[in-house]
């Protein structure tokens, strides 16, 4: 288990945008940058506030649209927090699952996946070829339970 690592960086993002023939707008880059620099999942309002600090005048709708594009590209993931709000983070590299601290929203990722075996069995049992899954765990981090 290790803390979130971000390997893509701004240059990697440009390549991904260009490969998909999408414009690498300052807004899209800023939204990604804000998420990349955060240790926790961010709500839409905190993303908006941070993007506005970088690019004054950026509207909430633009932030939403940029997030949608980044999610489509697989660069950003949307998660569900316990209070029913959605939050966003940079997508992890490879197959990983997040554990979210319910107190501070800090995210720890783990690479161990218990679901592959279960998926195999379920595929056999149900005849549905399971291709993907979404798993997210909640808890209290060390800092918050102290
Ligand atoms: Zn915590
Ligand atoms: Zn998994």
Image: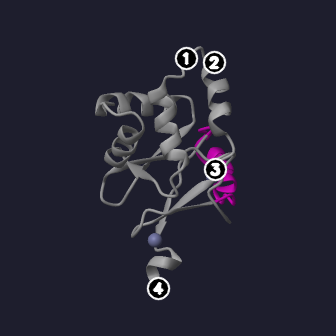
Report how far apart the C-alphas of labels 1 and 4 lie in the structure.
46 Å
Between 5 and 58, the one nearer to me in the picture: 58
Q: Quadrant of residue 1?
A: bottom right
Crowding at label 1, few (<14), some or many (≥20) Cα neighbours within 10 Å?
few
The residue that mark 3 highlights is: 119
Picture residue at 65% right of the left edge, 39% below the top: 9
User: Does mark 3 have its CB less than 8 Å from ligand 2?
Assistant: no
Query: Which of the numbered marks, if any, corresponds to residue 100?
Result: none
Query: What secondary structure is found at the residue carrying circle 1?
Result: loop
* Residue identified by numbered label 4: 146
Reading the image, the residue beneath label 1 is 22
Which of the two discs, 1 and 3, labels the residue nearer the N terminus?
A: 1
Indicate which disc, 4 or 3, sits on the residue closer to the N terminus. 3
User: Which type of secondary structure does the marked residue at label 2 adopt?
Assistant: helix
Q: Residue at x 62, y 57 (%)?
A: 4
Q: Are marks 2 and 1 in contact (CB under 8 Å)?
A: yes
Which range of residues does the magenta coloring cover? 110-131
Of labels 2 and 3, the one closer to you: 2
Mark 2 vs 3: CB contact within 8 A: no
The residues tagged by marks 2 and 1 sit, at their Cα atoms, a distance apart of 6 Å
Provide residue 13's location: percent of width, then percent of height: 62, 31
Residue position for label 2: 18
**Which numbered mark, 1 or 3, is in the foreground of this view?**
1
Q: Nearer the viewer, mark 4 or mark 3?
A: 4
Tell me which numbered mark, 1 or 4, is placed earlier along the sequence: 1
Q: Calculate the distance from the C-alpha at mark 1 to the C-alpha at mark 3.
A: 35 Å
- Disc 2/disc 4 C-alpha distance (Å): 46 Å
Which picture quadrant has residue 75? top right
Residue 67 to residue 109: above or below = above
Position of 51 with respect to 130 (left or right) is left
Q: Residue at x 66, y 18 (%)?
A: 19
First-in-chain label (2 vs 3): 2
């Amino acid at each position: 288990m290790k803390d979130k690592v971000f390997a893509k960086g701004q240059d990697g993002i440009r390549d991904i945008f260009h490969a998909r023939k999408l414009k690498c707008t300052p807004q899209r880059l800023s939204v990604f940058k804000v998420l990349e620099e955060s240790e926790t999942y961010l709500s839409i309002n905190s993303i908006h506030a941070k993007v506005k600090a970088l690019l004054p005048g950026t509207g909430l709708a633009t932030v939403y649209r940029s997030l949608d594009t980044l999610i489509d590209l697989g660069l950003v993931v949307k998660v569900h927090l316990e209070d029913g709000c959605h939050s966003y983070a940079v997508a992890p590299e490879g197959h990983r699952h997040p554990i979210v601290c319910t107190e501070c929203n800090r995210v720890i990722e783990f690479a161990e996946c218990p679901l592959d075996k279960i998926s195999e069995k379920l595929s056999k049992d149900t005849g549905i070829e399971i291709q993907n899954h979404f798993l997210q765990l909640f808890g209290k981090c060390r800092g918050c339970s102290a």
